[in-house]
Image (cartoon, rainbow, N blue to C red):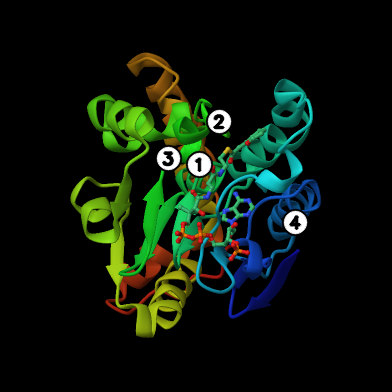
Amino acid sequence: TILYEVSEGVAVLTLNRPDKFNAFTEKMNKEITDALKQAQKDAQVRCIVLTGAGRAFNAGQDLGDVAGGEVDFGGFLRDRYNPMILQFQKTEKPIIAAVNGVAAGAGMSVALACDIRLASDKASFVNAFVGIGLVPDSGGCYFLPRIVGMGKALELAMTGEKVSAAEALRIGLVNQVYPADSFMEDAMAYARKLASLPTRAIGLIKRTMYKGLEMNLEETLQYEAFAQEAAGSTEDHKEGVAAFMEKRAPRFTGR
Ligand code: LHQ
């Protein structure tokens, strides 16, 4: 239910159930978690791109699996979605959501769990949970207020209103918007640029910034010192300083 391909330092993970708007199934949740683990282990991978096949990015849980019967919602989340979302954080490489079309429900939450969001001008975001009488899950209640602020987060979650790409850019929900015609080329150029930067420092930036959300200033300063010791011992740090002194462009290798 997903495609996984690595080239030029970038792993592209494509959600691949286009006729169902790439809605999540148990199999897909598991495959995404496993693909992220694989990308983390693979030294060739220095940036990860998550995108959707066809017209949509992802429409959230496949409602065909929950319609009718009694659903164990807690179990659903604990067994399937929560480990997947945690894997986005555990992956110490930049993860880009290349939002090619609509991102709804847990599909929107997954885009929020990525580090950078690039949107096609045909993309949109729907916090669809309230529309079926549910609460944002898969980290939606954590990431949304942190990305757009509490006021907008509550509005989007309580109304479930559709947010266009232009509005998403205006409120800081996405980092860039590109024309649909060239979207994947533009997103891949962005990803290749990130993949050419000091990957270990970027992984440490990711870990330290997310940790900083949970800590006070003193703890964060301590964590920065710890992270800096790790970053300062990388080859890329030495290369960056050497290139600066020699007035040339740096060649980072991710080590
Ligand atoms: C779908 C879906 C879908 C199946 C579109 N499933 N087929 C966690 C724990 C436990 C339980 C529940 O959930 C969760 C987490 C969640 O994610 S809850 C939220 C679940 N998602 C939604 O409620 C969104 C439902 N979908 C929509 O609101 C719309 O389809 C969106 C806004 C995504 C797109 O609207 P349109 O562009 O108008 O497209 P469409 O509605 O015509 O959908 C296109 C096709 O995709 C259609 O199939 P068809 O065979 O008729 O062409 C839809 O049935 C199918 N599809 N979402 N979640």
Distance in Å between CA atoms under marks 3 and 1: 8 Å
Which residue is disc 4 drawn over?
41
Q: Earlier in the sequence, mark 3 or mark 1?
A: 1
Which residue is disc 1 drawn over?
109
Q: Earlier in the sequence, mark 3 or mark 4?
A: 4
Vertical comparison of 99 with 247: above or below: above
Vertical comparison of 70 with 181: above or below: above
Which residue is disc 2 drawn over?
137
Which residue is disc 3 drawn over?
127
Q: Earlier in the sequence, mark 2 or mark 1?
A: 1
Disc 2 CB within 8 Å of nearest ligand 1 atom: yes
Image quadrant in which the C terminus is located: bottom right
Disc 1 CB within 8 Å of nearest ligand 1 atom: yes
Tag 1: amino acid: Ser
Helix or strand or loop: what does disc 4 sit on? helix
Image position of 240 (left or right of 82): left
Q: Earlier in the sequence, mark 1 or mark 4?
A: 4
Q: Sort mark 4 into few (<14), some (14-19) or many (20+) by Cα contacts within 10 Å.
A: few
User: Who's the residue at 64% across and 68% down the image?
Assistant: 19
Dots 3, 4 in contact, CB < 8 A: no
Tag 3: amino acid: Asn
Dots 1, 4 in contact, CB < 8 A: no
Q: Does residue 17 appear anywhere in the picture?
A: yes
Distance in Å between CA atoms under marks 4 and 2: 28 Å
Dots 2, 1 in contact, CB < 8 A: yes
Tag 4: amino acid: Lys
User: Who's the residue at 50% across and 71% down the image?
Assistant: 55
Q: Earlier in the sequence, mark 4 or mark 2?
A: 4
User: Who's the residue at 52% across and 33% down the image?
Assistant: 132
Image position of 255 (left or right of 240): right
x and y, in percent, of residue 134 in the image: 53, 27
